[in-house]
Structure formats: C-alpha cells, structure tokens
Image (cartoon, rainbow, N blue to C red):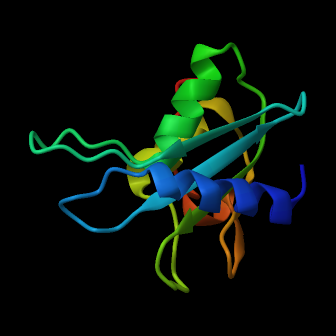
Amino acid sequence: MNKESLLKLAKEAYENAYAPYSGFRVGAAVACADGSVFTGCNVENSAGTSVCAERVAIFKAISEGAKDFAGLAIACDIEKDDLVPCGFCLQTLSEFCDDIEIYTPTKTYTLNKLLPERFKLK
C-alpha cells in the first residue's frame, strides 16, 4: 500500500480516538507485506494506562497473525510538523522489524533513523 493510502487510513482512524485528557487524537495504519492493513487510534483513560495509536494498530495485526510489517503511517487532528511515534511505539516496532518506513503527513522517516540504538533479544 502506498504512503498516501496509508495516511488516509490513519486520518480516518483518529476519528475514533478517545483522548479526553490530552485532547490530542492520533490515528495509525500499519501495512503488512501480504497487503493487509491494520488501523488504530489512541485510547486514554484516567488510570494512566493509555495506549498509543501505533501500538493499537500493531497489536491488532499481531493478534490476527500478521508480523511482517511493510510501512506505518500516523496522523493527528492538528497540524504538526514534528509528529513521530513515541519511544514505546518505536521499541514495539523494533520487536518485529529491522527497519520500516514511517510516514507522517509532512515527512517520511525510518525506524533506524528514529531509534538507531535499541534493545533487541534476537
């Protein structure tokens, strides 16, 4: 799936975000090598155990048996030039990818650029 299509799905996903505390709605779409795509949105809660959109999408993919990721797009409901996944999300991606392209509305990154040194058991 191309960058623009993934970004469109990420933008659609943030419409479902539950962000009453931060007011910052984020959506993500992860594409797999087999062509399947999984979306997610951030979900906050008062206990502080909120989950980022990227991890929701990754966890949905994993729970359906998909592990070979080909690209990730993220989008939010405000204009933001420096939108990048948080450290938790980057580390989660690194569990399943050596490198992957990460698309935002304004930039394209790679996992290796955003998290050059990371913990890896394998």
Quadrant position of the C terminus in the picture = top right
Query: Residue at the spot x=53%, y=24% of the render?
Result: 121
Query: Residue at the spot x=69%, y=13% of the render?
Result: 65
- Is 47 situated above or below 6? above
User: Residue 58 appears at what percent x and percent y?
Assistant: 58, 34
Quarter occupied by residue 104: bottom right
- 13 or 98: nearer the viewer: 13
User: Residue 105 appears at what percent x and percent y?
Assistant: 68, 76
Asked whether the viewer can see residue 110, the reply is: yes
- 5 or 120: nearer the viewer: 5
Describe residue 80's horizontal placement relative to residue 46 as left or right.
right
Total residue callouts: 0
- Is 22 situated above or below 27? below
Query: Residue at the spot x=9%, y=39% of the render?
Result: 47
User: Residue 106 appears at what percent x and percent y?
Assistant: 68, 82
User: Residue 44 appears at what percent x and percent y?
Assistant: 26, 47
Asked whether the viewer can see residue 111, the reply is: no
Quarter occupied by residue 68: top right
Describe residue 36's horizontal placement relative to residue 42 as left or right.
right
- 50 or 33: nearer the viewer: 50
Describe residue 12's horizontal placement relative to residue 117 as left or right.
right
Query: Residue at the spot x=22%, y=58% of the render?
Result: 20
- 20 or 85: nearer the viewer: 20
- Is 47 situated above or below 5? above
Quarter occupied by residue 38: top right
